[in-house]
Image: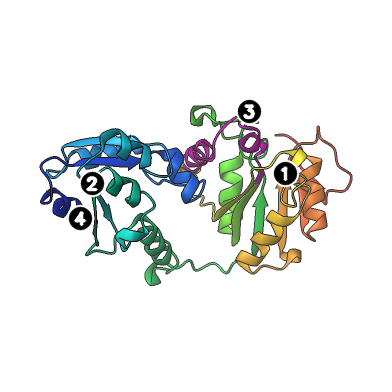
Amino acid sequence: MQYLAEAKTLCDRLIVAVNSDESVRRYKDSLRPINTAQHRMYVVAGLASTDVVTHLDEDRPLSLLLLWKPDLYIKGGDYAASSLKSAEAVEQYGGAVRVIASDFRTSSSQMIERIGAILCHATPDGAPAVTRRGLVLLDRDGTLIRDVPFLHDPAKVELLPGVGEALARLQAAGFTLAIVTNQQGIGLGYFTEQEFIAVNQRLFRELAPFGVEIARIYYCPHSLADHCACRKPGTAMIERALRDFQVPPERAFLLGDRDADVQAGIAAGCRTILVDPSHFSEAADRILSSP
């Protein structure tokens, strides 16, 4: 807001190009942006300094600059005008480049970092009295919720019978709960990571009435053809969880509905429980019968 307000003082009409979601993912990471382009453009359009808002699909604004040929190309940040890749093209058609430094440290990356730091601090009065006995790693589809192929619609999330009550008992007994799930639909292009996260948010809402909290979700977005180390029966997700929570394998359980879950747990040194007898695995430490 500050740098756009200053930019407006330099010109008669201020056109703001907002990065599309796809371009943000390319130069940041696949889980960004936090807010969609539609929402970000709505906010920018509401500022008194802004006359026109458009979206930028490319990584550089060069095509827009050559289309409009504005008198000024204004950039916010700590850049030097000479370092901007599009500056030369602007100057060639007679335009000028201006850089306005921000007076505030309020980038989304910094806010995410601060939120993460805040969440790492336990509230003294709210600390649980139960000593953690170990870690329970849970498969998601077919174990916690009904198995829907390539699930990406939150409306189709259906908690399996008894799951909420069982997880609440584990949590009350002092176990930390985390999810380890294969999601090759992401790698195959059937759904996005954002859709995967939306499904998990619905799962959290389904578990909330039971007071159940999932501490972390570990997921493998790769397909079988990628030959990665994280896709179960690979152990990378499990080993990372053990490191994150500083729990030795002998104090960890893996619950799943497939032999791949059992094999991954055994390979990582955990005890294993198969919750779907139809996918029989002699290797599992215990097999639970359907209610």
Measure the alpha-carbon separation of dots 1 and 3: 15 Å
Of residues 131 and 251, which is closer to you in this image?
251
Q: Mark 2 packing: few (<14 Cα in 10 Å), some, or many (20+)?
A: some
Q: What percent of the width, then of the height, locates residue 112?
A: 39, 58
Of residues 263 and 20, which is closer to you in this image?
20
Measure the alpha-carbon separation of dots 4 and 1: 52 Å
The residue at the far bottom in this view is 124
Q: Earlier in the sequence, mark 2 or mark 3?
A: 2
Q: What residue is shown with label 4?
A: 3
In the displayed structure image, the side of residue 234 where residue 166 appears, left or right:
left
Q: What residue is shown with label 3?
A: 148
SS at mark 2?
Answer: loop
Q: Earlier in the sequence, mark 2 or mark 1?
A: 2
The residue at the far right in this view is 282
Quadrant of the image occupied by residue 126: bottom left
Q: Quadrant of the C terminus?
A: top right
Q: Which mark is residue 49?
A: none
**Magenta region, mostly helix, strand or loop?**
helix
Q: Earlier in the sequence, mark 4 or mark 1?
A: 4
Q: What residue is shown with label 2?
A: 95
Is 187 included in the stretch rendered in magenta? yes
Residues shaded magenta: 181-204
Q: Amino acid at mark 4?
A: Tyr
Can residue 207 be seen from the camera position used here?
yes
> At 76% from the left edge and 65% from the top edge, which residue is drawn?
250
Quadrant of the image occupied by residue 258: top right
In the displayed structure image, the side of residue 32 where residue 6 appears, left or right:
left
Q: What residue is shown with label 1?
A: 256
For marks 2 and 1, give the one nearer the viewer. Answer: 2
